Image (cartoon, grey):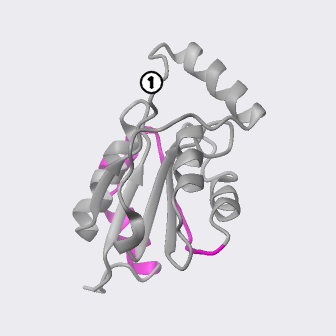
């Protein structure tokens, strides 16, 4: 039996809901990625900050993370910010050595789908096997049990039932 970690960053709660659904379906362990300095709650302020951070390649300091060494599979969840992963997720991926592990990206979005999230995750995890990701629109992840179930079966991380 593979040991699964579900690491995620969620600003609005949508990605957290999807991470919790994945945990329910897989039995994995949840890990919330938290920046030391939280993002503003006002929508336009976070949009402006995220856009500038992504443009600059900024990696915010994040709070302590779990020891990923004992996990075989690491799901990595992020909101789709400007067609890529949120900067705290990039910080997590750069900070953790995921060499030899299976990495599975997932995201929530407002219309952009996976965009470049899988490609950018692969670039930050060069020694990992990155599986096909999953994208949920807005908070639909909370209602996407059948789609998540089919995705997990399709990538071989849930038994056929």
Residue 12: within the magenta?
no
Q: Total label count?
A: 1
Q: Residue at x 56, y 55 (%)?
A: 93
Q: Which residue is drawn at 67% across and 70% down?
A: 126
x, y percent for residue 83? 68, 43
Question: Which image quadrant is residue 29 in?
Answer: bottom left
The answer to whether 108 appears left or right of 25 in the picture is: right
Residue 141: within the magenta?
yes
Question: Which image quadrant is residue 160 in?
Answer: bottom left
The answer to whether 138 appears left or right of 30 in the picture is: right
**Quadrant position of the C terminus in the picture:** bottom left
Extreme residue toward the right, this view: 55
x, y percent for residue 41? 44, 17
x, y percent for residue 85? 60, 46
Q: Name the residue under label 1.
A: 38
Q: Residue at x 55, y 36 (%)?
A: 110
Observer-nearest of 117 and 152: 117
Question: Which image quadrant is residue 60 in?
Answer: top right
The answer to whether 3 appears left or right of 147 in the picture is: left
**Quadrant position of the N terminus in the picture:** bottom left
x, y percent for residue 145? 30, 60
Q: Which residue is drawn at 64% across and 44% down?
A: 112
Mark 1, secondary structure of its residue? loop
- Magenta range: 127-154
């Amino acid at each position: 039996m593979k040991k699964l970690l579900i690491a995620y960053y969620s600003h609005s709660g949508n990605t957290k809901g999807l991470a919790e659904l994945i945990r329910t379906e897989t039995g994995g362990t949840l890990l919330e990625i938290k920046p030391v300095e939280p993002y503003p709650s006002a929508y336009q302020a976070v949009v402006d900050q995220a856009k500038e951070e992504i443009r600059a390649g900024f990696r915010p300091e994040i709070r302590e993370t779990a020891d990923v060494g004992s996990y075989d599979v690491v799901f990595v969840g992020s909101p789709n910010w400007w067609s890529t992963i949120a900067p705290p997720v990039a910080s997590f991926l750069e900070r953790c050595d995921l060499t030899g592990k299976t990495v599975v990206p997932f995201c929530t979005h407002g219309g952009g789908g996976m965009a470049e999230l899988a490609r950018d995750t692969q670039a930050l995890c060069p020694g990992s096997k990155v599986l096909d990701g999953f994208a949920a629109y807005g908070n639909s992840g909370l209602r996407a049990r059948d789609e998540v179930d089919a995705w997990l079966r399709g990538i071989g991380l849930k038994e056929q039932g």
